[in-house]
Image (cartoon, grey):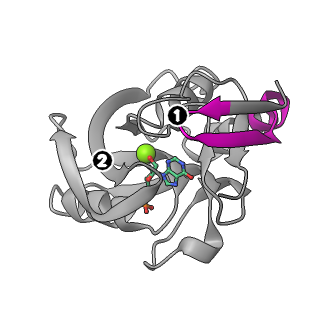
Amino acid sequence: MKQVKILDKEFKLFIPYEKIRSEVEKMAEKMNNELANKNPLFICILNGSFMFAAELFKRIDLLDSEITFVKLASYEGDKTTGNVKQLIGINEKIEGRTVVVLEDIVDTGITIENILKQLEGMNPKEVKIATLLLKPDALQKQVQLDYIGLEIPNDFIVGYGLDYDGYGRNLIDIYSVIND
Ligand code: IMP
Ligand code: MG
C-alpha cells in the first residue's frame, strides 16, 4: 500500500519494512557486542514499542538477557500532551542491573526523561536508551540516546506499532501524514 487513510487523515508510505528491519538488525548486532556478559534487562515502553521490541529482542543472542514492559502514554491524537501517564509500572528489581530502555520514537524527549528519572531512583548499574526513531527537530530535553535507528523529520507518523488515536499500529511499514 502506498497510501492509507486512518480516521480523518491520509498517510503516505515513508519507511518500508525492509529498511526498518535492517536498522534493527544493525542495532541488535551492536548490542550483542556491547552488552555481552552484562545480564541486561530490556524495558519496552508500551504501547508503541511492542513491534520494535519484538523485532530487536529475537535478534539478541545473549542468553543472560531479560525483557519487561512498562506502559506510558503522552500522546492524544497526533500531539503530545506534555505530561506522561504511567499505566503499568516496573516490578523488576533494577538495583545493580544494566537496563536498556526500548522506545519506538523519541519526539520531545519527555517520555524518556520521565522513565530515566524513575529508573535513577531504583539504583541501576547503568541505563542505556535505544530508540528506533528520533525526531531531532522536536527534541526539547537533553537525553543521551545510546542506540538510534533512524532520524526522521518532524512529521506525524503511524505504523509498525505507532498509532493515530489507537489505529494504524498493525501496518507493517511506517507511513507519514500528508499535510493537513
Ligand atoms: P515524547 O515524550 O514527546 O518524546 O514522545 C514519545 C512518545 O510519543 C512515543 O513513545 C510515541 O508513542 C509517541 N509519538 C511521538 N511521535 C509520534 C508520531 O509521529 N506518531 C505516533 N506516536 C508518536
Ligand atoms: Mg511510545
Q: Are marks 1 and 2 in contact (CB under 8 Å)?
A: no
52 is within the stretch colored magenta: no
Residue plotted at (66% across, 36% down):
28
Residue plotted at (15% across, 34% down):
91
Query: Quarter holding the N terminus?
Result: top right
Q: Which residue is mark 1?
A: 7
Q: What amino acid is found at the position of numbered circle 1 in the picture?
A: Leu
Residue plotted at (78% across, 41% down):
12
Q: Nearer the viewer, residue 115 or 134?
A: 134
Asked which quadrant contains residue 89, the reply is top left
**Secondary structure of the residue carrying numbered label 2:** strand
Q: Which mark is residue 140?
A: none
Q: Which residues are magenta?
A: 5-23
Query: Quarter holding the C terminus?
Result: bottom right
- In the figure, 15 relative to 169: above or below? below
Q: Position of residue 139 (x, y in %)?
A: 52, 74
